Image: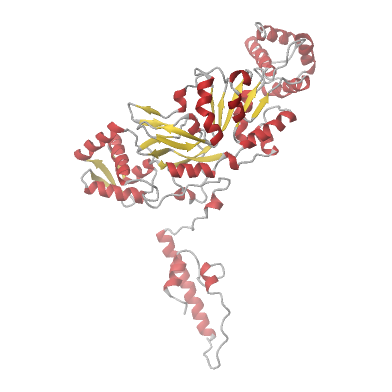
Amino acid sequence: MPDLSQDHLLARLAGNGDPNSADNAWAALAATEPEPARPGAPVESSAEATRSAAGEKKLDELLGRVKQLVGAKTPPQPAAETANEDAFLPVEPSSLREADLSEALIEELILKYLLSVGNTTGRTVADQIKLPFKLIEERLRQVKNDQLVVYRGTAPMNDYEYQLTDMGRERARRYVEHCSYFGAAPVSLKDYVRGIEAQSLTKQHPTADDLERAFSDLLLSKRMMRRLGPAINSGRGLFLYGAPGNGKSSIAERVTRAFGDYIWIPRAIAIDGEILRLFDPSNHEEAPLEQVAGLLDSHVDKRWIRIRRPTIIVGGELTMTSLEVTLNTSTGISEAPLQLKSNCGTLVIDDFGRQRMSTDELLNRWIVPLEKRFDFLNLPNGKKVQVPFDQLIVFSTNLEPKDLVDDAFLRRIPYKIDVVDPSEEEFRELFKIMAPKLGFEHCEDAVDYLIETHYKGRPFRCCQPRDLLMQIRNYCNFQKQPPQMTPELFDFAVENYFAVM
């Protein structure tokens, strides 16, 4: 007869097969050489062996039906296999203590959400707060015992529909007066710092191939690539300066592509009783993680969100307020500053020197973070906290850096790269690249005419092939004729484009 021990049955029900099989962990513990038969010991007859095999088959069929009924699942794969290229994968907490959350905070989020929607099921509340249902279910049971909610009805999967009582509604209103936030439960500052350290730019070392991929849609000289490579590898900061129109902003926008594609950030952070909203759809692009056989989704902490490594670009609109925690007084919700939102990515200060704030203000604000790689933020409650300052800062300007900042600051920006004018050969190559993209058939004779006629003493700029061809295309569309590169149309485009230049 087959072995019907408790361990045997548990192993089979768990989907692990026979505990004595070679591919089972238990088999490793029991993998010893069989003892030789003792003289006089009974030998199993062929009939008994047949009955044993038949019993084993019946047992397999029975266990298979049981597993179908209980919906047995394949054991989850290790995080290292499912994370693929992700260096950090937040794991779903098994308790509020592990999530570093207080019961009072969870109660507050539940009551404010119920005040907003009226009534809903427990699983909907769990989806809103981004915590496992088993943790939310415990708190819902407690607030019901406290007579803050009542059952309005039953719901599938051993759930109920909840509604606030008068006492619960009054308490929820008091919570809303302080802060109206009822989104995802916040992540502790300690866990956020740990996540940033695991995904830090200092751990990324882009190679020449990575740079080629990042700037594949730009025409950059080998000299420029050799200069950009070490600067990007430093993960610190760089100045891109030079004449306008040579692609400084385009280069700055693509720097992030040289690093890993994705990172994880919390939707919100809890800092000394304050909730700081970090995920910003206007600056962050969500990149949902692909599920592996429907298993991964249930093991990731949904308080975190996977995004493309951020590239945040600010120009003349930048003010000192953008670099500090801002409190919305009407909602009581605090918003993270730009440097926190750009951690593990790139923060581009475009048109540096033309901001509404003076360059001295900006540089004095960042002179320590640029060197120490951490920043201090002032919270609305008056406390000051230390946070990571882990991004590549790119200052893009068509002004001379030494005319904008002093030597002390320039020392903290180790790389200063002059984005020079293209050569004539590169200028011609840009026309070859842009012509098919804008619907033209490239004509070398027309480009020869343009250079010989209109570029005597006039510097080449990287943006001009695109801009001149767009002038011609717009004219052709107006005249209802196919776009084409001709000397006459280049004369028209140059007259418009360089009218006051």
Q: Quadrant of the C terminus?
A: top right
Residue 159 visible, this orientation: no
Q: Residue at x 31, y 41 (%)?
A: 110
Which percent across, then down, holds residue 234?
63, 36
Write down the quadrant of residue 419 in the picture: top right
Write down the quadrant of residue 35 in the picture: bottom right
Q: Residue at x 51, y 90 (%)?
A: 42
**As rendered, which of 327 and 35 lies closer to the eye?**
327
**As rendered, which of 239 and 168 lies closer to the eye?**
239
Residue 37 visible, this orientation: yes
Q: Residue at x 72, y 11 (%)?
A: 490
Numbered circles on residues, count: 0
Identify the image's colour scheme: rainbow, by chain, secondary structure or one colour. Answer: secondary structure
Q: Is residue 90 above or below residue 26?
A: above
Q: Is residue 234 above or below residue 3?
A: above
Which percent across, then down, holds residue 26?
51, 70
39 lies left or right of 137: right
457 lies left or right of 162: right
Which percent across, then down, holds residue 408?
59, 26
Q: Residue at x 32, y 40 (%)?
A: 109
**As rendered, which of 343 and 3 lies closer to the eye?**
343
- Going by the picture, which residue comes out furthest to the front? 408
396 lies left or right of 459: left
- Going by the picture, which residue comes out furthest to the bottom? 40
Q: Is residue 80 above or below residue 453?
A: below
Which percent across, then down, holds residue 424?
77, 19
